[in-house]
Image (tube, helix red, strand yellow):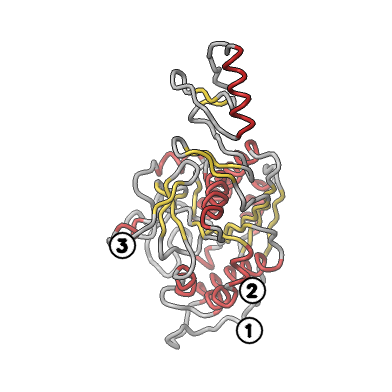
């Protein structure tokens, strides 16, 4: 239900003052009812305009120079028990939170992204979003369930099925220590490589890579796009955003730079998993690092990604915008200080 805004009719001089402020680019706020007449909105609503400005009360307005009009989202899907096990995690014999079959996490992840994208599109009419699922060996039944979910999206979607022998001539079957790696790991690396190739060859601007066990908050897409525009404008450079506030980030006391996004604080981090948002420019600039991450098993797997973070800003939100649905005790899993069960329940398919 839409909230009604009750405020007294403005007098002549007040109306003139508001018009002058609007033309000069200033915003004013009525402290009695928190109404912003220059925007015709109240505090608590989204005050920012995509590719125009981001407003943070009381810090003011940032005029956007780094404009975003297109976002590609690539979800790496693994639902086959042959590849990943039903509810256990890659290279780990640990059960995930809620202990459901793997496809359940995939479906809720996709559903959360669709819901979050719809909210962004309701606010930003000119934004273009593409959702691509790169799937590795899912059953026909699971693919149909995924497709049925994608059919509900109000934007472009597609499923790309990865061939079993794809990239095998490029992926090293031994790790950086010359030890053999598992078929599951090769499958994982193949999917990462496929998503990177899509970003390199097909993406127009921003790309959001994520694994199929990250359930996103409904505000996730809106917050990340507006934050990318704002902070990239302020820094005058491309950046990385990770949607997850990982528990391990609190295990060591390290220096961070703090930024104000749209409705979140963001802090600089030196490490993430392979779920992040960045621009095609960054993919092309650091292509050799990304390719090495997908073709050679490093320890940690994200080693070549972390090398990029030594040169570029990577920011993580507080509180988190996504729940990584791993084991409840995993330091790389569920974020602190959010309602995990609510987020899980909201995205039931």
Identity of the residue drawn at 59% across and 28% down = 21
Most distant residue in the bottom direction:
178
Whether pointer 3 and pointer 2 mark residues with C-beta atoms closer than 8 Å, the reply is: no
Question: Which of the 4 quarters of the picture holds residue 237?
Answer: bottom right
Q: Can you identify the residue that label 3 sits on?
A: 254
Give the CA separation, mark 1 to mark 3. Answer: 40 Å
Task: Identify the disc placed on residue 164.
Answer: 2
Whether pointer 2 and pointer 1 mark residues with C-beta atoms closer than 8 Å, the reply is: no
* First along the sequence among labels 1 and 3: 1
* First along the sequence among labels 3 and 2: 2
- Left or right, 84 with respect to 208, comes to left
Image: 247 above or below 184: above
Image: 185 above or below 102: below
Give the CA separation, mark 2 to mark 1. Answer: 12 Å
Q: Can you identify the residue that label 1 sits on?
A: 169
Give the percent coordinates (x, y) of residue 114. Answer: 61, 45
Give the percent coordinates (x, y) of residue 86. Answer: 48, 59
Give the camera-side residue of 152 and 258. Answer: 258
Number of residues whose C-alpha sits closer than 10 Å to that of mark 3, classed few (under 14), some (14–19) or many (20 or more): few
Identity of the residue drawn at 48% across and 57% down = 242
- Left or right, 299 with respect to 162, comes to left
Give the camera-side residue of 137 and 327. Answer: 327
Give the CA separation, mark 3 to mark 2. Answer: 42 Å
Secondary structure of residue under mark 2: loop
Question: Which of the 4 quarters of the picture holds residue 315?
Answer: bottom left
Q: Quadrant of the N terminus?
A: top right
């Amino acid at each position: 239900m839409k909230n009604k805004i009750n405020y007294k009719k403005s007098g002549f001089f007040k109306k003139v003052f508001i018009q002058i402020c609007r033309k000069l680019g200033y915003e004013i706020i009525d402290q009695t009812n928190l109404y912003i007449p220059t925007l015709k909105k109240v505090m608590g609503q989204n005050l920012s305009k995509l590719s125009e400005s981001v407003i943070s009360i009381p810090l003011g307005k940032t005029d956007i120079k780094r404009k975003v009009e297109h976002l590609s989202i690539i979800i790496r899907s693994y639902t086959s028990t042959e590849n990943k096990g039903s509810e256990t995690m890659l290279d780990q014999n640990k059960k995930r939170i809620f202990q459901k079959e793997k496809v359940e996490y995939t479906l809720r992840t996709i559903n959360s992204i669709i819901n979050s994208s719809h909210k962004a599109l309701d606010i930003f009419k000119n934004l273009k979003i593409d959702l691509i699922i790169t799937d590795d060996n899912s059953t026909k039944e699971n693919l149909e369930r995924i497709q049925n979910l994608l059919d509900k999206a109000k934007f472009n979607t597609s499923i790309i099925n990865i061939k079993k022998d794809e990239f095998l001539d490029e992926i090293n079957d031994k790790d950086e220590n010359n030890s053999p790696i598992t078929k599951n790991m090769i499958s994982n690396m193949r999917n990462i490589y496929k998503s990177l190739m899509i970003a390199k060859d097909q993406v127009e601007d921003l790309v959001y890579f994520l694994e199929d066990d990250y359930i996103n908050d409904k505000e996730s897409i809106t917050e990340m796009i507006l934050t990318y525009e704002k902070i990239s404008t302020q820094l005058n450079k491309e950046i990385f955003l990770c949607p997850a506030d990982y528990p391990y980030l609190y295990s060591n006391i390290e220096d961070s730079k703090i930024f104000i996004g749209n409705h979140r604080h963001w802090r600089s981090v030196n490490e993430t998993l392979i779920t992040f948002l960045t621009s095609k420019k960054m993919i092309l600039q650091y292509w050799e690092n990304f390719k090495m991450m997908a073709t050679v098993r490093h320890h940690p797997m994200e080693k070549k990604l972390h090398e990029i973070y030594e040169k570029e800003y990577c920011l993580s939100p507080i509180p988190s915008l996504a729940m990584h649905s791993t084991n409840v005790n995993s330091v790389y899993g569920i974020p602190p200080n959010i309602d995990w069960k609510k987020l899980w329940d909201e995205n039931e398919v």
